[in-house]
Amino acid sequence: MWFNVSSAPFLLTGFPGLEAAHHWISIPFFAIYISVLLGNTLLLYLIKDDHSLHEPMYYFLAMLAATDLMVTLTTMPTVMGVLWLNRRVMSHGACFLQAYFIHSLSIVESGVLLAMAYDRYIAICTPLRYNSILTHFQVMKIGLGVIMRGFLSLVPPITPLFWFPYCRSHVLSHAFCLHQDVMKLACADITFNRIYPIVLVALTFFLDVSVIVFSYILILKTVMGIASREERAKALNTCVSHISCVLVFYITVIGLTFIHRFGKHAPHVVHIIMSYVYFLFPPFMNPIIYSIKTKQIQRSIISLFS
């Protein structure tokens, strides 16, 4: 009996109480998913195809677009499966792997935004050494480091999920698997799984955003020392797209964290909506921000469609 309960599959949840409207709710979700796929695929194609975009800044942007694509492709099948087909059943292995990729890619995205801040710092504070510091090899090393940090750091909390017994309810609170959701269903000592994510968030998200803020303080100090107003505006304009993406990502992270920590009395649907905002808003906005704010990307888009 213990084995049968423990091995029962998990059940995903869409919008509780709104099951009859799932087909209608799926329309904006599908439109956003398609927009995310098209926008980020277009960015990747432009950066690959246009030789004027073969620079460190755009290589890091390609990493950001690829990460956003992977996040979307990781969550999209189960979300649309629940909304379209009411397909709620998910095996343990598939659930744990989905949680692993979701959380790993969040840390990768934070790391890519940090790498982009480093790129802007070098470009503005030491422009004469930019090409010698950010060589293709150096960009590859930074990218590999960001990916390894994201994917290796999630191995310790996800691995125990495979051997935990699950004897409580098997109903998850979202249409995708999250570590914090699954661990609460385990009938085992989950002390490590409670403490490790807190330490990990402190050493990744909080550390990353602190370094990004510090780098922009140095950038602002350098820019204020430029005599020409036009040159100051030009230097700051190259940072606008990155700052916008940083704000979009970290504001959604902070919003989701506050809802989970302090919104215990908020309706459950608010928690669900904030989770979708966190996973969909940055991938949706990033291509739009760079298309509007970056002239080289604009020129490439015009060239492609003309």
Image (tube, helix red, strand yellow):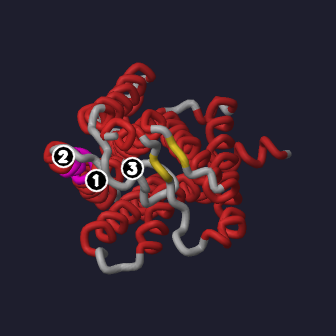
**Magenta-colored stretch includes residue 278:** no
- Disc 1/disc 2 C-alpha distance (Å): 8 Å
- Identify which amino acid the numbered label 1 is placed on: Lys
- Disc 3/disc 1 C-alpha distance (Å): 10 Å
Q: Which residue is mark 2?
A: 190
Read off the magenta span: 197-207
Who's the residue at 32% across and 53% down the image? 168
Give x and y (percent) for residue 35: 68, 54
- Disc 2/disc 3 C-alpha distance (Å): 15 Å
Residue 21 visible: yes
Give x and y (percent) for residue 207: 21, 49
Locate residue 161: give its quadrant.
Answer: top left
Give x and y (percent) for residue 177: 44, 48
Q: Earlier in the sequence, mark 2 or mark 3?
A: 3
Who's the residue at 41% across and 43% down the image? 99
- Identify which amino acid the numbered label 2 is placed on: Ile
Element at badge 2?
A: loop
Q: Which residue is mark 1?
A: 184
Front residue of 60 and 1: 1
Q: Which residue is mark 3?
A: 178
Element at badge 1?
A: loop
| Residue 154, numbered circle | none
Please report contact status of discs 1 and 2: CB closer than 8 Å, yes or no. yes
Who's the residue at 52% across and 33% down the image? 55
Please tell me whether the stretch drawn in magenta is mainly helix, strand or loop. helix
Front residue of 19 and 218: 19
Which image quarter is the N terminus in?
top left
